[in-house]
Image (tube, grey):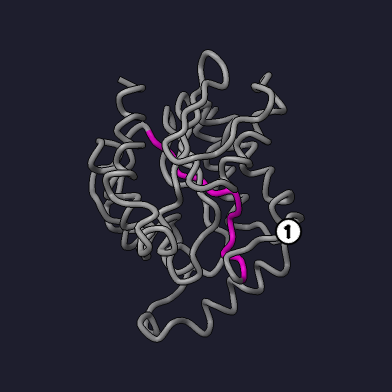
Amino acid sequence: MSNRAWKSLRRDVIQCELCPRLIKHCQQIAKTKRRAYIDQEYWGKPVPNVGTLPARLLVVGLAPGAHGANRIGRMFSGDRSGDWLYEALHRFDFANQPTSSSLDDGLELHDCVITNVCRCAPPGNKPTTEELNTCSQYLDRTFALVQPEIIIALGQLAWKAVLKNLSTRLELPKPRPKFSHNAIVSLDSHIQLLGSYHPSQQNTFTGRLTKPMFHRVFRRARRLLS
């Protein structure tokens, strides 16, 4: 039943047209393209979750990159953020390879699912509050199906979205736990939330996030699951 629901969720995400501004932007980017990818066919629509059930680790990001996931059709793929994420997942045995370059590159996740708060590439990488609220139904369904033991929130917006989602089903600590890199919060006896700076170029190029810092979060997740 869960696998059928998982496939249904994927199909519903891909076919979603609830946010006209985002759909228009994804399609426009796919049409104009970036010069480096001018010969490639862009995905150009909402991007579904990565991974299969069962999975104890759930990684939550913000939104697809315009020329990354919106081009490839897989979250955190085809850009530097994805280079960092999949290398870390591979290093700690959550993925069979350290790169994600196309939908047929053989990538498999182990005991892990990747999701985003927003499923479409937004203009300026900033979805509106209304768009995030509209897209939250897919995050709800993802949480319900995955039922993770460990959640890694990549960035403060993902952290807040996770807490907002789980507040509808769990008694969360008060005040709400604050985001910080390598923060850890036990949300109940079964779920632990880890925080990490997002592996965006804004963070990695400036040195705010380094590879050792990023690896520390995923090493911690691996140890908790072991």
Residue at image point 72% right, 62% down: 19
* Viewer-nearest residue: 60 or 72: 60
Residue at image point 50% right, 43% down: 60
Residue at image point 29% right, 45% down: 88
Residue 119 part of the magenta-drawn span = yes
* Viewer-nearest residue: 3 or 203: 203
Instruction: State the extent of the magenta-drawn residues as a range.
Output: 112-123
In this rendering, is residue 103 above or below 57? Answer: below
Which quadrant would the N terminus be assigned to in this image?
Answer: top right
Q: Answer with left or right where residue 131 lies relative to residue 38.
A: right
In this rendering, is residue 59 above or below 208? Answer: above
Q: Answer with left or right where residue 87 lies relative to residue 152.
A: left
Q: Residues within 10 Å of mark 1 (few under 14, many from 20)?
A: few
Q: Answer with left or right where residue 77 lies relative to residue 155.
A: left
Q: Answer with left or right where residue 96 lies relative to residue 125.
A: left
Name the residue beneath numbered marker 1. Answer: 18
Instruction: Specify the quadrant of the image occupied by residue 121.
Output: bottom right
